[in-house]
Structures are given as structure tokens and as C-alpha cells.
Image (tube, coloured by chain):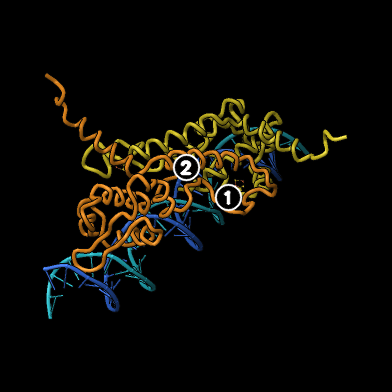
Chain colours: A yellow, B orange, C blue, D cyan
Amino acid sequence: MKLSTKGRYGLKAMFDLALNDGSGPVSLTAISERQGISIHYLEQLVSPLRKAGLLKSVRGAQGGYLLAKLPAEISVREILELLEGPLAPAACVTDEKNSCSHSDLCVSRMIYDRIYASINEVVDNISLQDMLDEQYRNLQDSIPDMNNK
Amino acid sequence: MKLSTKGRYGLKAMFDLALNDGSGPVSLTAISERQGISIHYLEQLVSPLRKAGLLKSVRGAQGGYLLAKLPAEISVREILELLEGPLAPAACVTDEKNSCSHSDLCVSRMIYDRIYASINEVVDNISLQDMLDEQYRNLQDSIPDMNNK
DNA sequence: TTTAATCTTGACAAATTTACTCGGATATAT
DNA sequence: ATATATCCGAGTAAATTTGTCAAGATTAAA
Ligand code: FES
Ligand code: FES
């Protein structure tokens, strides 16, 4: 029931891109160094994100990647779903197949449906901008005596 | 982000046991035939459930397994967590380890925490009894013209 | 124009996890 | 006794994950 590194690294990469949003293209080398992910592996993650229109790429020297939309317009769900597939606990939730039981009425499936819905409720409502805001809040808190006498 | 067959089959097996609750021990052979799961594989699933006190076993001929508690007292979370481990989307949510980032403040982790909480919210509040109720409701609905003139 | 940086693609491979299978021991009702 | 069960620990084949690598295309800058 774990996300794979694809989803986790991909989200980290997108967040890194969001942090550097507006500063021109960011090279995979830079992301690789900051986040500790192999460049070659990053290439795999970034490719579907670009094809789906979440990223734009700039080729050639000084090139790299940049967000195709505003951070507020990119949800965590889009990112994770693209890299992991549907965030469902069982295939039958999103596939047409009757799967396990002969009948259409499967009680287990009701549970998996509900889990799927609750996960989506969370990731649908978090954007990269929300992550940036959270990061900023964390940085504020890590400066302990800021508002003390 | 999928459950493994361990969790899915285990839940099915427990539901099967709940359906036959009160009718004496149910053999793995019977569950195997009804649910289409290999007996040897079922043994693996049932073993931790017994050790955790969710099931009781009766050895020897005419033996089998039965629920150790009332269906209302066994939650889907207990079952799945026992067979799958914590239903968290990343290891750092439940392990002590700082994991990905050097700092304790990881924005990704905030997201994973929230997903974890929302999954548990669902599975904590569904018991085997709830599944039985749902099953009964489904059976009622499948008799179409019951309340028609 | 040359060079260097970077994206792009696809194939390949190691490591890990999943999803089982198998053999044999132990226990008990008939 | 015998048939029917649970128990227990190995072992294993397939699938998935987690990368690596090589070769080529594109473009910016010198
Ligand atoms: S149809 Fe998917 S669990 Fe039953
Ligand atoms: S600490 Fe787990 S995602 Fe950052």
C-alpha cells in the first residue's frame, strides 16, 4: 500500500520546480543534486509529466524544465496519478472488470471505493502552491526567536 | 498504491468467516472453494490473524477457524493492517526515520500524513458487521419486484 | 560553425517484492 | 486406524520496482 519512488520522487521534483518557478528553466542536473535523485531516473519521471502538459521543456544549453501552469493550478493528484496510475487500493475500483466475485455486488469493493474517494479528496485539494505556502510557514517556524523580545 | 493479495484475500476470508459466524468451525477448504483461493496460500493469511487474536482455530477433523470476537468488534483496519502493515503511502509516515529530507520539515510528508489519516478514518469505521449489513442490503435490492404491486 | 549542454528515447539489468507451492508434522473426530 | 484438519518453515517463479546505459536530437552560446 505504498507509493513507489516514481510518485514520491516525481512529487519532490515538481515541488523543486515550483520553488524555482519564474527563474527560468531548471536543469535535471540541478534537481538531481538538490533532491538526491539520479538524473537518468529523473528523466523517466519528467517525461510523462511533460507529455501530460504539466511541464514545459527547453532544449539546448542552459535549458531545462519549467512548470507549464501556475503552482496553484497543479494539484498533487494530477502529479501522483500520472506517475502511479489511479490511487486506488484495488484494480477493480477503476477497471471495468467484475474482478473478484461473480456478482456485481462485492462488499470488499465498497470499502475500496470509499478508500479511493477519501484519498482523492485529500490530494485533489492540495496544489503545489499549497505546498509552497506550507514550506514558507515551516521556514518561519524554524526561526525560533523571531518575535521574541 | 495497491493492496496486495494478502490484504484482499485476507479480508475476503474474514468476511466469509463472518457470514458463517455461529455455525461452528469453518475449514480452509470450504473458504478456498467459495472464494477461489489456494488452501496453502490461505494458511499464510490466516496464521497472523490467529496469532493476533482475531481468529480461533480448532484442529483435527471437522475443525477449522472461527471469529474470536463478534463481527461488530472486528474492524477492517485491524485485518488489513495486520496483513499489509500500516496503510501509509510512504514509510516515513510510520517509521521514526527522517527519510527523504535532511530537515524534519518535509512538505511531501505532510501530504502522506494526511492520506494516511484519511484512509484510517475509513477503515477504522467499518466492521465486519457493517459488511454483513451491506451484504444483506445488496441481497434485498437484487430481488427487484419485492415491494411492487 | 563549433562546442557543450541538455533533452529524448528505448533497451537493459539488478534488486526486491509478491504470490504463490510444497513437504511434512501435529492434532482430533469418527 | 483413518480421514480430515490445522500448523510451520522452506523454497521458488513471476512480476514489479528501481534504476543504469547508450545513442541521438536539439539548441544556446562562444
Ligand atoms: S470486485 Fe474487487 S474486491 Fe470484489
Ligand atoms: S520525509 Fe518522507 S517524504 Fe520527506
Q: Residue at x 60, y 43 (%)?
A: B109
> Where residue B104 appears, x then y in whole percent?
68, 47
Residue B57: image quadrant is bottom left
How would you rate the neighbour count of disc 2 (Cα within 10 Å): few for under 14, some for 14-19, many for 20 or more? some
Q: Which residue, given by chain and number where applicable, does mark 2 sit on? A: B120
The reply to whether residue A118 is in sight is yes
For this orientation, the residue located farthest to the top is B149
In depth, the one of B68 and B103 nearer the eye is B68
Q: Which residue, given by chain and number where applicable, does mark 1 sit on? A: B92
| Cβ of mark 2 under 8 A from ligand 2 | no
Question: Disc 1 marks which amino acid?
Answer: Cys
Question: Disc 2 marks which amino acid?
Answer: Asn
Q: The numbered mark 1 sits on a residue in which chain? A: B
Up the image or down, B60 lies above or below B113; here it is: below
Q: Nearer the viewer, mark 2 or mark 1?
A: 2
Q: The numbered mark 2 sits on a residue in which chain? A: B
| Cβ of mark 1 under 8 A from ligand 2 | yes
Up the image or down, C22 lies above or below B7; here it is: below
Q: Residue at x 59, y 33 (%)?
A: A57
Residue A89: image quadrant is top left
Callout 2 secondary element? helix
The reply to whether residue A78 is in sight is no
Q: Residue at x 20, y 51 (%)?
A: B34
Q: Residue at x 38, y 40 (%)?
A: B126
